[in-house]
Image (tube, rainbow, N blue to C red):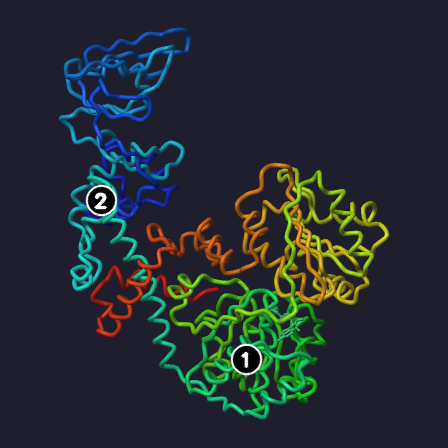
Amino acid sequence: MNGETPLLALKGVGAAIGQKYGQLGLHTIADLINYFPRRYDDYSVLTPIAEIVPGAVSIRATIKQAKGRYVRRGMHITEAVAGDDTGSVRLIWFNQPYREGSLKAGAEYYISGNFELSHQRLSIMNPTIELVSDMPLNTARIVPVYRETKGLTSRQIRAAIGQIAKVIAGLPETLPEWLVTKHDFYGRSRAVYALHFPENADDLAQARHRLGFEEVFQLSLAALSNKYELLTEQAPSVPFEEKVAKEFVSHMPFKLTDAQRKVVWSIFQDMQKEQPMNRLVEGDVGAGKTVVAAMAAVMVLHHGHQVALMAPTELLARQHAETLQKLLQPLGFGSQVGLLVGGMTAAQKRSAREHIASGDIRFIVGTQALIQDTVDMHALELVIIDEQHRFGVDQRRTLQIKAGHMPHVLSLTATPIPRSLALTLYGELDVSVLDQKPPGRSEIITKIESPNSRPQLYEEIEKELTAGRQMFVVCPLITESGAVKAVSAEEMHEQLSKKAFKHHNVGLLHGKMKPADKNDVMQQFVEHKLDILVSTTVIEVGVDVPNATIMLIEGAERFGLAQMHQLRGRVGRGKDQGYCYLMMSDSSAPSRRLRALESSSDGFKLAELDLELRGPGAIYGTMQHGQLDLRIAKLTDTILIASARSAAQKFIDKHEDLLQYPYLHEQVSKLRAVTNLN
Ligand code: ADP
Ligand code: MG
């Protein structure tokens, strides 16, 4: 029996049960070995019968008698009495008539279960029971509980794992010996064994420590490998010209914040190098990332090269093209900004491509589809990715082939990634933080609302609208759905435009509309032809309408923390006080998420909380479940992360050959691909 042996080789695993294992993604012995328990029930402490109290108990006792009977039709009871030196206790099983025959009177058992009151008498109800002479799996120890599926219980899984204890004990080491020795870690086999068969709490803690370290070590090694690979790439240097930067600043309608200045300076320095820049700028919504990108672009345009900016949606691409045209106009580069998106007509696209080829347009703004487009990018020197966590190596490669070399890459994101996570996952990135908002912005007033406060809320809103401000209303659904109890954008639009705010202009925007229609509606809102825009989360990223001061989120309990924080960032971008109302579907108590949002406007703090509540998947929004499968390590454990990171660096500094560690190599290759995708 080895790792590749199918589970069907185990006792008790036939075709039907095998299929159940398949549903859990388990096919081989190796899969089962790596199927770590979800939690544990501690039945390790045996209590003398005289001392047991109501609750979970474990005893070691001899069965004295056992008798089954039907108390009424369909209701069978098995009653047994078990005793030890200190006393005796009653055991009761419901509807398990086979018990009577299977219990051996006079034999000693481990018995674990809940000691509780039933029919006015204290008994251990439906206990798990195992002969002391057998190796106990389900009693008298810290019992692992696995993720189950219908027809496959933890008990069955424990029985299967019990059969492969020997294989686990013989697992080869997967970490370099020097690391295991240095940290005094459990070996791989001992650690995995302890997860499935923990002797005590300390044994379990040691196992988790070692395996958690290993997970983060693999992740760090993947990130560092990516980094060093990138360091071998060449990119043309973009010399810094002070007068260009000064001129840009002199034409700006405002002064750069210190944070903007610092970040821009790092970018200029990066681009001067002959290695490709790979910088991520994290800045909370409204921190002013667009200006930073514009300044980087200007330097490249000045030297006669191309710049491409990619945004996640066409809507945002269009808005960026417009903003950038305005920002670059005074320097004479305004006409070099050109839009290329799927929603344009064939003629418009052809014309754009021609202008790009002729060099009239050198700053190309679009969605990520640009990478696939036939557009001529032979002079591409800088790629700016807006509102994406990062830009994958695969996408880089495509551009490298198109451009003939690796371009400099600048990523902008408003999803603040906690530092612990950024260091681990983005080891290959240089991260800058725009930790300062432009001056004069007041905090957005955030309030949790419930349906019965709606009338007063609408009165408040009416005042703002009358004063000339605008409002976003975001709904969780486009149309009514019988299955989900939440207000839809269409329904909300109907209500607001016909009733509550019928004296105002109310528009509707959602993802199923044609791109041209979406743009129309958005444009009307930007031009204040609409006072209220009811939408789904299509407006989540980037959209900038300084006159919009109210964000009303309907069915707020259905949204994620990071998502709502982004939505809130759509308002309060101008000089007026911004408001964000979190409207719940009913009057139940607000969740921790909503309360956090109400009390904090710090994107980083909220991201930490999101990480705690939902795991790293919340931040890696588009990542497939299970890809970044940290089963043991907590990314909030900063000490563990620091030590695993420094070990990964050491591994590289020692020029260790990854191929010598087949398992590590396999994991790292997988993770390199994962952490390289958006
Ligand atoms: P984000 O970081 O969310 O992309 P934007 O770049 O859209 O933010 O900027 C938000 C708003 O702040 C814009 O209206 C922009 O003109 C303005 N802004 C940017 N930088 C400054 C600054 N230094 N001083 C004043 N306003 C600024
Ligand atoms: Mg932006």
Would you say residue 643 is visible in this rendering?
yes
Q: Which residue: 59% across, 45% down?
A: 557
In the rendered image, residue 649, in percent from the top left (x then y), is placed at: 28, 70
In the rendered image, residue 89, in percent from the top left (x then y), is placed at: 25, 14
Q: Amino acid at mark 1?
A: Arg
Say left or right for 491 vs 621: right
614 vs 233: above or below:
above
Image quarter for ligand 2? bottom right
Q: Residues within 10 Å of mark 1 (few under 14, many from 20)?
A: few
Q: Which residue: 71% across, 49% down?
A: 489
Quadrant in the rendering for residue 359 = bottom right
Would you say residue 374 is visible in this rendering?
no
Say left or right for 459 vs 186: right
In the rendered image, residue 453, in percent from the top left (x then y), is placed at: 71, 41
Quarter of the picture holding the N terminus: top left
Residue, disc 2: 202
In the rendered image, residue 578, in percent from the top left (x then y), is placed at: 68, 59
Q: Which mark is first along the chain, 1 or 2?
A: 2
Which of the pair 206/385 is nearer the observer?
Answer: 206
Residue, disc 1: 261
Q: Residue reaching furthest right?
A: 503
Q: How many marks are shown on the rendered structure?
A: 2
Do callouts 2 and 1 mark residues in contact (Cβ within 8 Å)? no
Label 2 secondary element: helix
Mark 2 to mark 1 CA distance (whole Å): 51 Å
Say left or right for 445 vs 632: right
Label 1 secondary element: helix
